[in-house]
Amino acid sequence: MQLYAMGASSDEQTLYIDFLDSWSCADVLDVRVVERSEAERIESFVDFAKDFLNEGFSCVIWVDESHLRSWSEPFVHDLLLHGYDDRTREFDVLGFDGDRVFTRLRWGYEEFSEAFARGLRLSAPGGPFEYIHHPMRLMRAKGQSHEFSLPVFRGQVCDFLGGPSADPTRDGRSNWWWTFHPDPEKLPDDFSTVTGVAVYERFLYQLGELHRKGREVDYRLFHLLWEHKAGMVKRLEYVSENLGMGKYLQDVTAGYRMLTSDLFRLRMNVLAEMRRGRADGNIPEHADAVRRVWQREESVAEKLHAVLRVF
């Protein structure tokens, strides 16, 4: 799991904090991007989807969600298609529901096929979503076991502390799998892609921009930040229990549990404020809480790296 952030204040993009892109998982995943030309030749989307699902692939796919949710304005967004049921003629999908909760969803064959077709048209060159050049990405586990690697874990902790300015696993081809690498000559100075602990700086920058413009905070920013810390706790528990390192990592694990608890409480407060229509009122307070987590995590992560260096 890796934390990264993107943002450009000039076009008011929201900060993105998310998990490791599948390009970085070449050791465990077979990944194939479906080009637009291939997608436009699909005669029956239902048959095409069943074929790749039967071969063990899941698919991140761009569709017009406004068709699925009866929204008035077009909105092309990605969902994870992972199964189907011929009895009910429905696809199994993962994505956000109407309350912005990442959950399991189901849509009928015909309406999902139409949503995909509309997404293709809306993302065609000259369309409102033309930045989506690759409408589908197929992923399948390679079926080989990979033992936990302490040196890899140690290296990832080091990378997290270092906060590299770009993700080298993308081979410079793209900042997102579905589009092309942006032209740096056309981007404002404040645009950057950052990873690791440096994400906090971008996070705070974006909170400041939202506060300055009187915009609401999306609780998913805090939710994904919390999930990253919860993932760290799980990894530390695994190392402690399976590699006999519990006594060495006791304080570090406790530190990450506290960080996880603090971020969980913060994200729930932000969610409650959103539902009360007050998501823009306490941004300075939220920013202070994030700064405190940032400072503590740097200290805890450095202790973790010091322990791992011994082994």
Image (cartoon, grey):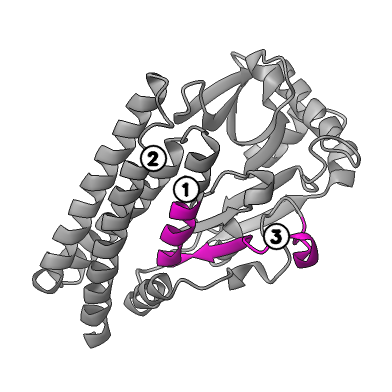
Estimate the x, y position of residue 115 in percent, counting from the top left. 74, 24
- Which residue is pictured at 25% across the width and 38% down the height? 265
Going by the image, does 51 lie left or right of 5?
Answer: right
Of the 4 image quadrants, the one containing the N terminus is bottom left
Residue drawn 37% across the image and 19% down it:
276
Picture coordinates of residue 251, whole percent (x, y):
12, 66
Which residue is tagged 3? 188
Residue nearer the viewer, 221 or 54:
221
Of the numbered discs 1 and 2, the one sitting upstream in the chain is 1
- Farthest residue toward the bottom? 310
Q: Crowding at label 1, few (<14), some or many (≥20) Cα neighbours within 10 Å?
A: some
Numbered tag placed on residue 208 in the rendering: 1
Earlier residue among tags 3 and 1: 3
Question: Would residue 265 be seen by someone viewing this image from the given angle?
Answer: yes
The quarter holding residue 82 reads: top right
Which residue range is magenta in the image?
180-205
Q: Residues within 10 Å of mark 3 (few under 14, many from 20)?
A: few
Give amino acid for label 1.
Answer: Gly
Q: Secondary structure at mark 3?
A: loop
> How busy is the neighbourhood of tag 2: few (under 14 within 10 Å), some, or many (20 plus)?
many
Helix or strand or loop: what does disc 1 sit on? helix
Q: Is residue 121 above or below residue 25?
A: above
Badge 2 marks a residue whose secondary structure is helix
